[in-house]
Amino acid sequence: ANVCLSGADELEGQAERWAYFFEAGCSSWFEAIKAHTFRSTFIDLHSQEASVIVEHWERRRQICAASDAEGRQVEEAKLCSIFEEAASALEPLRLRLHAAARLGAGLLFVVCFFLAVVSNREAVQTESAASSAGLAFVKLSTRSPKDSRVALAKAKAAYEARLASMSPAAAGLLDDNERWKILSEEVTVAGAVPSGTQGLELLLTSERVWEDLEFALRGPDGLLKSVSNSYQMSIAARAWDPRVTLRSEFRGIAWNGRLTCLCQYFHPLFFPELLELKATIEADCCEKFSHPEVTAAVESLGGHCIIDFAWLGKGEVVIVELNPFDGSLSYELGFGVVAVVVVVVASCCTNTHVPKYDTAKHN
């Protein structure tokens, strides 16, 4: 890797890193930009429930490692057994998640700051009723359970079913770009669930969830402990907008309080219709970023952050979320590889990138 542009960590102490990670979540900026983002209701979380998730994943990993060492297949019965044990311990959580993701009341976007304690059901039901569909999407404030084995298996099956439903001639006309679009759509949809039971299943089968929960519980001194004073996690219940699609999501980087670049969130995918909309999308996102409430929220995160936009049409932009980072720290905190380009794009000009697809190469 080319690290010549990297710099020293701005947060040198582990305690400061830990505090930075868990104090800069959605609840820290939501109130400032609630007029510009999806409506949300925040709820508390019990650390004991996060501990169950962590323990389940570690037991699962031990079983898989033992099987690998002995050169045999994993005993699915053992995995099912520890899953059922964890699910049983989390039954109160499942019921609260189910209440939050009421079937038929609307598509609820549940952003988990790490598992839910629904202390205000009325607020959650209000968010659910505000949407037009009937599923829920479960996501950590830091990262989503998009690596869930259950979700990925569901997406794979749906992708294969869509291809199988096409005539051989139609399937043969699909290039790599179109196939990746179908797969990306199915991976996204696989994270939407109709009940607390399925939402809990995603959380229990995600290594990303385990990593963040373990870090939250471990604390800066490296010891698992009772975190009565420092462990302050929440859940946000957000009304889902079905207009948000693969082509409508954009990721920006703010540096020193200025929006310095903008690209497709699903950057490997090519949408030819976006080429002629590039200037409009850039102008709309920049206009949204310029709102005083938004710039103030960015400044509250140190002026440096990743900012995700949903472009819903000319003049209509919603901020999805802000992900704070401080350069080299962002790898450890799970905010993605975009950190390595921060120094490159940290200029006063906004650089908007829309991929151009080489049809000759892929047809």
Image (spheres, rainbow, N blue to C red):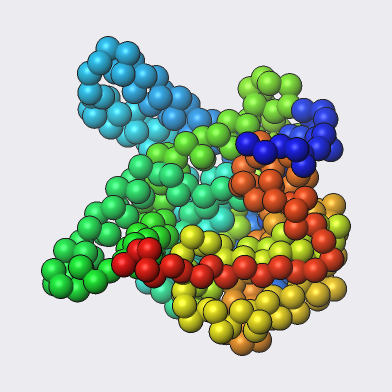
Q: Residue furthest left?
A: 168
Looking at the picture, tell me which residue is in the foreground, 223 or 299: 299
Q: Residue furthest front?
A: 360
Q: Residue at x 53, y 78 (%)?
A: 274
- Say left or right for 331 vs 153: right
- Say left or right for 264 vs 37: left
Q: Which image quadrant for residue 163?
A: bottom left
Residue 110 in percent (x, y) is at: 52, 58
Q: Residue at x 54, y 31 (%)?
A: 51
Residue 5 in percent (x, y) is at: 77, 42
Residue 223 in percent (x, y) is at: 67, 19
Q: Residue at x 74, y 75 (%)?
A: 286
Looking at the picture, tell me which residue is in the foreground, 359 or 257: 359
**Total numbered circles:** 0
Looking at the picture, tell me which residue is in the foreground, 240 or 143: 143
Q: Residue at x 65, y 26 (%)?
A: 218
Residue 35 visible in the displayed image: no
- Say left or right for 113 vs 144: right
Q: Which image quadrant for residue 326?
A: top right
Residue 53 in percent (x, y) is at: 48, 34
Question: Which quarter of the rendering shows the C terminus?
Answer: bottom left
In the displayed structure, 143 sits above or below 328; it is: below
Q: Residue furthest bottom?
A: 314
